[in-house]
Image (cartoon, rainbow, N blue to C red):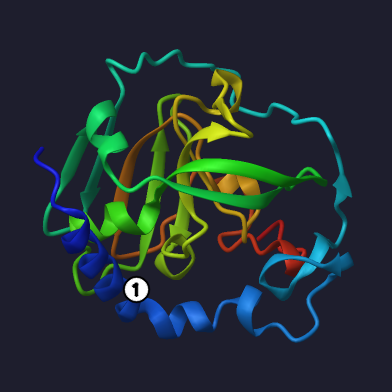
């Protein structure tokens, strides 16, 4: 597809953000007065570690037991569902979008956290702004090449630190961690960020994904110890 210029993308981003601003301002990472956790205040005014977490310098690998190998030539991302303008991007089109850098923490529901990961990628809000979610859109379902799915409410998905990343700590994202591209959700438990992402489906309901169907929380707020439904 022919990509619109940066000015149009920024305008679409701001318009979409304005639609969900009130819901975003009411999310726990913004409104909780006394979030559960330990350590010095970190990003978003939250404790460094959510309750029940321990810091690791390693990056454990958790998946469904399938590690898909996707070449950059074959890689595609679809954004569809309840949108006015479905997208299908190849690798070069993905890289033509605004590339951003961010440092955030990674909190796994299995009780480990890795701090200060440096990411490089594309804001999810930019992709959704191009696709133009319909007026009653509520959430996204992220689909991965290994069959994994996970749902995220739009007020969380549209936050500026939710990225589709291809680089971690200055290196191309390793295949075992979801390369060539995975989603990250720093204000939620990490299972909400799909590895090997292939499709972002916009929903008008909030139907559960793989782990949510198996008893994990739909909302997944680390600073509320919100692990299970």
**Mark 1 falls on what kind of element?**
helix
Asked whether the viewer can see residue 82, the reply is no
x and y percentages locating residue 50 in the rendered image? 81, 61
Asked whether the viewer can see residue 54, the reply is yes
x and y percentages locating residue 120 in the rendered image? 50, 41
Q: Is residue 222 above or below residue 41?
A: above
Number of dots carrying numbers: 1
**Label 1 sits on residue:** 17
Nearest to the observer: residue 172 or residue 33: 172
**Residue visible at 31% across and 56% down in the picture:** 126
x and y percentages locating residue 176 in the rendered image? 60, 21
**Residue visible at 28% across and 44% down in the picture:** 97
**Residue visible at 36% across and 13% down in the picture:** 71
Instruction: Classify residue 15 by image quadrant.
Output: bottom left
Q: Quadrant of the N terminus?
A: top left
Q: Residue furthest left?
A: 2
**Residue visible at 81% across and 30% down in the picture:** 58
Relative to 104, is 47 on the left or the right?
A: right
Relative to 32, is 56 on the left or the right?
A: right
Instruction: Classify residue 33 by image quadrant.
Output: bottom right
Nearest to the observer: residue 7 or residue 176: 7
Q: Quadrant of the C terminus?
A: bottom right
Label 1 environment density (alpha carbons within 10 Å; few <14, some 14–19, many ≥20): some
Relative to 123, is 54 on the left or the right?
A: right
């Amino acid at each position: 597809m022919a990509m619109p210029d940066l000015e149009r993308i920024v305008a679409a981003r701001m318009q979409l953000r304005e639609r969900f601003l009130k819901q975003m301002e009411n999310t726990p990472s913004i409104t909780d007065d006394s979030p559960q956790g330990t350590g010095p205040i970190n990003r978003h005014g939250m404790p460094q570690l959510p309750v029940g977490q321990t810091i690791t310098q390693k990056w454990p690998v958790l998946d469904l037991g399938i590690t898909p190998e996707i070449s950059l030539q074959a890689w595609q991302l679809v954004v569809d569902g309840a949108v006015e303008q479905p997208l299908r991007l190849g690798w070069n089109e993905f890289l033509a979008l605004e590339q951003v850098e961010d440092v955030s923490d990674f909190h796994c529901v299995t009780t480990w956290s890795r701090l200060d990961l440096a990411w490089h990628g594309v804001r999810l809000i930019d992709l959704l702004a191009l696709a133009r979610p319909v007026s009653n859109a509520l959430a996204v379902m992220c689909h991965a090449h290994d069959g994994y799915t996970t749902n995220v409410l739009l007020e969380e998905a549209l936050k500026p630190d939710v990225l589709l990343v291809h680089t971690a700590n200055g290196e191309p994202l390793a295949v075992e961690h979801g390369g060539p591209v995975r989603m990250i959700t720093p204000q939620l438990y990490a299972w909400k960020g799909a590895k090997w992402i292939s499709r972002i489906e916009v929903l008008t309901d909030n139907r559960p994904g793989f782990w949510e169907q198996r008893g994990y929380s739909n909302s997944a707020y680390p600073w509320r110890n919100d692990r299970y439904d």
